[in-house]
Image: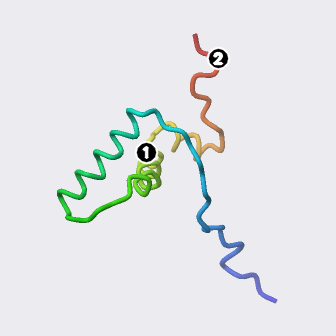
Amino acid sequence: MPKLRIGVLPDDKPVKLTAELPASVYRDLVAYAEAIARESGQQIDPAKLVPPMLARFMATDRGFAKARRTGHSPRTGEGEG
């Protein structure tokens, strides 16, 4: 049988994650959702903003991108000080 071009498909099933946020971060998240509602007229649950915000953060973090390219985990803060 010939080798297929597509190997194992990534697991793209959502994963539930529970996290505690500082109250100030939550208030900012709510304010962000309210700003979107004012601008677009679309009500958004603040929790729904977290995944795209995290994805955007990681996509624009140069240190993280470099670490992924080289196959190393970024070691932020370890051994400093």
Mark 2 lies on a secondary structure that is loop
Relative to residue 45, is residue 61 depicted above or below?
above
Q: Residue furthest top?
A: 81
Picture quarter with the N terminus: bottom right
The figure's colour scheme reads rainbow
> Which amino acid does the dot numbered 1 rest on?
Phe
Work out how far the residue at label 1 is from the one at label 2, CA to CA, in angstroms.
24 Å
> Is residue 22 placed above or below 52 in the rendered structure?
above
Q: Which residue is mark 2?
A: 79
As drawn, the residue found furthest toward the bottom would be 1
Q: Is residue 42 left or right of residue 25?
A: left
Toward the left, the furthest residue is 39
SS at mark 1 in the image: helix
Q: Which of the two marks, 1 or 2, is nearer to us in this view?
A: 1
Residue found at x 40% / y 54%: 49
Query: Residue tagged by mark 1?
Result: 57
Q: Earlier in the sequence, mark 1 or mark 2?
A: 1
Seen at 44% across and 53% down, the residue is 47
Residue 60 in the image, given as x and y percentages of width and height: 41, 45
Q: Along the line of sight, which residue is nearer the eye, 19 or 54?
A: 19
Mark 1 closeness class: few <14, some 14–19, many ≥20 residues within 10 Å:
few
Q: Residue 78: percent from the left, percent from the top? A: 63, 22
Q: How many marks?
A: 2
The quarter of the image holding the C terminus is top right
Residue drawn at x 20%, y 63% as measured from the top left: 40
Residue 73 disc label: none
| Residue nearer the viewer, 65 or 3 | 65
Would residue 22 be found to the left or right of residue 7 on screen? left
